[in-house]
Image: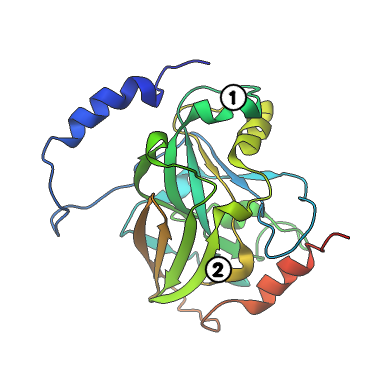
Amino acid sequence: MSDKYHYVELQPALHKLTEVGKGPLTSTVHLRSPLPRPRKILCAIGNYREGTDRDPLPLDFFIKSSEAVIGPGETVVLPERQHDIFHHEAELGVVIGAEAHNVKASEAMKYVFGYTAFMDISGRGGIGKPGFNSFLGKSYNTFAPLGPAIATADSIDDPHKLAVRYWVNGHLRHDYNTDDMEHNIPSLIEFASSVTTLTPGDIIACGTNHQGLGPLQDGDIGEIDVQEVGRFSIHVVDPLKRSWPVGIDAVAAARVKEGRPTTG
């Protein structure tokens, strides 16, 4: 394993930096994304059991544009292209800390620098070939809010036992635990690194439980909290002022769950 940029080497310098100007955040301080332009954002498709008892579905990823990244307190701008709906997806993001290629699951956690909270904003339909679920709708500018910081790997006891929650205008939507992952973080890293070399600063988003899925629309405030990692919010602006029923999208949630039949 290459230890270049690995947290073990950076730890003393980072701890020293935290003592400079240490104090509470104020209205004059604005946090930016801790990773302004990751080279790669690999997003696991689904990857949660969604309350079913079944064998895991095959692992799969899509790539989300790094140009979509914004930070805490910034604004998600819905594009003027027509889509069926715009959804939020609350996820745990894994930040890679050392170059990784063909890494075995048993060694994979050594390549983790830390964790961040990640919103996968998604435009459904309206782009790409008819009848296909194009992931272009997930790569608009501003569609990858992340933050509020990176919780280093040594500060998280078990990333597979973290509560993930998401609110829109103060109303709870996503509310699940990472212990429900189909494929754990070592498996995600092993699979991803068998396809492409992972480099320091790359993000693997671990997927979401779609049972809390809901729309984002003009004027909304979306807020994510990942236990032990952090909490931040974003604003939503839609130049076209479109609207959808407020609350959890029960139809979309049921469709996802029906596609995950129980075993036995």
Q: Secondary structure at mark 2?
A: strand
- Residue 44 coordinates in the image, percent (x, y): 63, 47
Establish if 19 lies above or below 51.
Answer: above
78 on left or right of 208: left
Cα distance, mark 2 to mark 1? 37 Å
> Which of the 4 image quadrants contains residue 226?
bottom left
Residue 218 visible (yes or no): no
Residue nearest the viewer, comparing 208 with 199: 208
> Is 15 left, or right, of 69 in this rendering?
left
Residue 142: quarter of image: bottom left
Which amino acid, by three-letter code, is at mark 2?
A: Phe
Q: Position of residue 83 (x, y in %)?
A: 61, 69
Instruction: Report which quarter residue 204 is drawn in.
Output: top right
Please tell me whether residue 228 is drawn above or below residue 188 in the rendered image. Answer: below
Along the line of sight, the residue nearer the viewer: 55 or 94: 55
Q: Which mark is residue 56?
A: none
For label 2, the crowd category at 10 Å Cα-Cα, with few meaning under 14, some 14 to 19 and many 20 or more, is many
To which residue does mark 1 refer? 107
Q: Which residue is mark 2?
A: 86
Residue at point 41%, 23% (across, down): 6
Please say whether residue 168 is visible from this viewpoint.
yes
Question: What residue is shown at x 62% (from left), y 65% (from top)?
Answer: 210
Q: Quadrant of the C terminus?
A: bottom right
Specify how the rendered protein is coloured.
rainbow
Front in this rendered view, residue 214 or 92: 92
Please report whichever mark, 2 or 1, sits nearer to the chain's N-terminal start. Answer: 2
Residue 36 is left or right of residue 108, and the answer is: left
Badge 1 amino acid: Glu
Q: Residue at x 50, y 45 (%)?
A: 159
